[in-house]
Image (cartoon, rainbow, N blue to C red):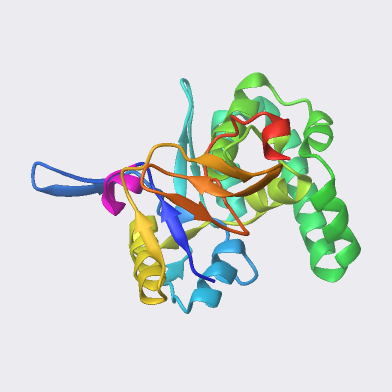
Amino acid sequence: KRIIVIERNGSLNQAVGAYARDGYNFCASPALSYGFDRGGVFHELSASLGIVHSVSVQSPCYQVALPDHRVTIFADQGETLEELRREFPEEIDTLIMFYRDLHRLSEKILKNRFWSYVTNHRSAAGFIRGYRFSSELTAFFDIQSLYFFQRPVVELSLADLITLCDTPPLSLEGGFKKLADQMNSTILQQGGEILYNQKDPEFASRGNNIVGIKIKQKVIEADTILLNQSPRYDSSTIF
């Protein structure tokens, strides 16, 4: 399919938060992520586009900073639990049980697709509630959940909670800047188009049907439209 990307920023570097300062290059987009493992969303997307990534597990993976605590997350769960023992000694027994129970569910998923269905359709909220974590410990999980899944931990599915706590994220060589460069090149090579400096598009209608989107230069008719932004449309407008 012919792809048209409509981007509000003026360049690819601005879109992924890449900038230079005092002779150094920085990028605000992440270098750690889930989804690059086999079967993950980025793996499937990249495979369909013929893009090859170099990914690896780093340990220590990252550090969670709270006002009164610093917890380093390791690839080895035992090392992470030692960090948590130091920072949350009164809750360590509950934490050990929590991680152990998630790992058991992870093993069930590998052996039985029924458990994969259950964990994907079950909320993490009820599971977490049973452990009665303190507000500070809940914040520890929230910070990670917001970074990797863009929502609080109680809004995750149980499957995503298992991923967050039982699987180390992969480090992407070159970060998302390199991934964006690769996707940009592939889209252009396949006859696609990328339009920068565009304001939020409007839907284009013909009669009672949405047929595409309006931008400042033209109307783009399309069968499929993906809006990568916070939902701000009334449900009647979408449907």
Quadrant (top left/top right/bottom left/bottom right) for the C terminus: top right
Does 33 sit above or below residue 156? below
Is 14 inside the magenta-drawn segment?
A: yes
Work out whether residue 202 or residue 168 is closer to the camera in this orientation and state it. 202
Q: Position of residue 148 (x, y in %)?
A: 55, 45
**Residue appearing at x 76%, y 41% in the figure:** 98
**Residue appearing at x 43%, y 56% in the figure:** 5
Residue ranking furthest to the bottom: 50
Quadrant (top left/top right/bottom left/bottom right) for the N terminus: bottom right
Residue 36 sits in quarter:
bottom right
Work out whether residue 90 or residue 231 is closer to the camera in this orientation and state it. 231
Residue ranking furthest to the left: 23
Is 140 inside the magenta-drawn segment?
A: no
92 relative position to 105: left or right: left
Numbered disc total: 0
21 relative position to 118: left or right: left
Does 117 sit above or below residue 52? above
173 relative position to 39: left or right: left
Q: Position of residue 116 (x, y in %)?
A: 83, 60
Residue 194 sits in quarter:
bottom left
**Residue appearing at x 45%, y 59% in the figure:** 4
Does residue 153 appear in this view? yes
Does residue 58 appear in this view? no
Q: Position of residue 188 (x, y in %)?
A: 36, 70
Q: Position of residue 110 (x, y in %)?
A: 79, 68
Tell me the magenta residue range. 9-15
Residue ranking furthest to the right: 114
